[in-house]
Image (tube, rainbow, N blue to C red):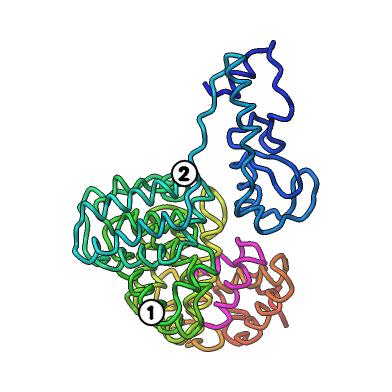
Amino acid sequence: SSPAAAAAAAPAVEVPSYFVCPISLEIMRDPVTLSTGITYDRESIERWVFTDGHGECPVTKQRLAPADGREPTPNHTLRRLIQGWCAVHAVERFPTPRPPVDAARVAAIVDAAGPLLRRRQREELMASLRELADIVAESDRNRRCVQGAPGAVEFLLSVVKERASVGVDDATSAKPDEETTCGGVHDPAKASSPEEAALSILHSLKLSEESFKRVLEGSGGEDFLETMACVLRRPSYLSRMQGIHLLKSALPAMAPARLTSASAALVDGVLGVVADRPSAKAVKVALHVLCRLCPWGRNRVKAVDAGAVSALVRLLLDEGCGGGGGGDRRACELAVVAIDHICGCAEGRLALVAHPAGLAAVACAATRLPAAAGAESAVRVLHAVARHSATPAVLQEMLAVGVVARLLFLVQVGASGERTRARAREMLKMHARVWRDSPCLASHLNASYPR
């Protein structure tokens, strides 16, 4: 048992209050003092500052200087007092904290590993990557140190790029569990290649937008996108999920010109994650990426050519079009937003009306999703079809599959917001000659048709 648990289990032993971290309320393992004069356990204060994003001292509420979070002052005197107290009261002593990792050590590992990569010395390279992974996994401070060390992220990306298009063993193609893919870091020791180990470390670093901007300068952006396109085509589910998370984090740091040049292979890889659904979270991340890519250049057409409409409509149908009952409503919202982007081009609208369930699925989502999320996008899709692709056959299909009835529902109820309601009314008036008084509409719907 831990010293904190042992002390708590002994009611006769009273723990001095100044041994207790004000955040965790447990005995401090590695006490550090801020400029405000308050001492905390290192792990707790680093989580408070960096993971939770607070900029003030939890006790005094004073603003913290940048150096407080980066290098709080170790309180060696208090640590020795705590260890002495544990010894006197027969409480298991905390081990002495290891010296913190600095950028020089990370740089030394990277410098030594670079030639190994060029000479393709696989086993030695894997040993260096495991050493980096152990450093990253030890603490948030180490993670930030590796992230900020000159050349470290670039080296890891170069390892991924080196042979990213090479397949892996079938054993790595099985779907990992949600906790492994979305929560922690995949153990690089279990990786089948240096590329997978480096990708796992990059995923665990949780790179900031500033880090990506530094790495993607110059031709780095194009190389990164092409590397991710290769990663997303690998048979390994884990690599693809880590790749899609990395891509989502990188896109905000990329200039529009770079997004415009995204390759068809990259778009196809993103849609492959949506279609294969390796995990619920990975699907939503891939949909975020698709929505980010579609507005730029000819990416919408690339998405249509890659089968985006079919994959998105299938997702809507499988998830109940956002109507609950066990379906993933957030995934449906993102899918409808992606269809909205895609239907901004003629090819996208043509693919939607050509899909046997396309119009019906979007109309269903319009009445089941919340207004601020997917409903407005769904109605905007239908409006684009009604305005730009309204052939007689399409208008009859909209009537037959219930699109018109759902538009009337939106007009009557108005639960999806005034703007959505106005767009639905505009569609109904636009094609009143075809839809009003149609025998396909129930009599009570004909009576409520806008005049």
- The C terminus appears in which quarter of the rendering? bottom right
Question: Which one is in front in this view, the residue at disc 2 or the one at disc 1?
Answer: 2
Q: Nearer the viewer, residue 109 or 379?
A: 109
Can you identify the residue that label 2 sits on?
138
Q: Nearer the viewer, residue 349 or 51?
A: 51
Query: Where, by quadrant of the figure, is residue 374 drawn?
Result: bottom right
Q: Nearer the viewer, residue 419 or 43?
A: 43
Q: Residue 204, how many percent across, how many down? A: 45, 53
Magenta region includes residue 230: no
Q: Amino acid at mark 2?
A: Glu
Q: Is residue 205 left or right of residue 429?
A: left
Task: Please state the extent of the stretch shown in magenta in the rendering.
Answer: 360-385
Q: Residue 267, how many percent across, how many down? A: 38, 74
Per the rendering, the mark at residue 407 is: none
User: Is residue 160 positioned above or below 437 on the image?
Assistant: above
Query: Where, by quadrant of the figure, is residue 402 drawn?
Result: bottom right
**Dot 2 surroundings within 10 Å: few (below 14), some, or many (20 or more)?**
few
Residue drawn at (46%, 86%), measured in percent from left and top?
Answer: 297
User: Is residue 283 positioned above or below 267 on the image?
Assistant: above
Q: Residue 326, how many percent across, how many down? A: 52, 48
Can you identify the residue that label 1 sits on?
222
Q: Residue 337, how many percent across, how many down? A: 54, 71
